Amino acid sequence: MRVSTSGPSAIVDPAGRMVDRIPFGTAGVVRASIEPRTEPTPYGTIGDAFAWGCVLLTLGLQVAIGKKRQ
């Protein structure tokens, strides 16, 4: 869902399709039936593992580059 006080508002389903919207400059209400997601999100599945992997990769690259310069 995207809500704005100064522009277009819309409801977008999990597949990225726009269910309903209000064009820019138009006052109104957007209503649509939505169903909650049943499968876990990628973050819900792996948690912070991706972020920690990025930290470890960055540190490893910094160490490797530091050793190469010496």
Image (spheres, grey):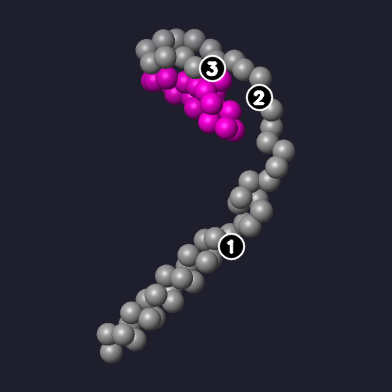
- The amino acid sitting under disc 1 is Ala
Which residues are the magenta region? 1-19
The answer to whether 68 appears left or right of 26 in the picture is: left
Residue bearing mark 3:
20
Amino acid type of the residue tagged 2 in the rendering: Ile
| Position of the N terminus by quadrant | top right
| Label 2 – label 3 distance at C-alpha | 11 Å
How far across and down, in percent of the image, does residue 43 sit? 60, 51
Query: Is residue 6 shown above or below 39?
Result: above
**Relative height, residue 22 to residue 70 (above, below):** above
Q: Image quadrant of residue 7?
A: top left
Residue under pointer 2:
34
Q: Residues within 10 Å of mark 2 (few under 14, many from 20)?
A: few
Q: Is mark 1 on a helix, strand or loop?
A: helix
The residue beneath circle 1 is 49
Q: Main secondary structure of the magenta part?
A: loop
Which residue extends farthest right?
38
Name which residue lies at 49% across and 24% down.
Answer: 3
Q: Earlier in the sequence, mark 3 or mark 1?
A: 3
> Residue 60 at x, y = what percent?
44, 76
Q: How crowded is mark 3: few (under 14 residues within 10 Å), some or many (20 or more)?
A: some
What separation in Å lies between label 2 and label 1 (alpha carbons)? 30 Å
* Place of residue 63 in the rendered image (x, y in percent of width and height, measured from the top left): 39, 81
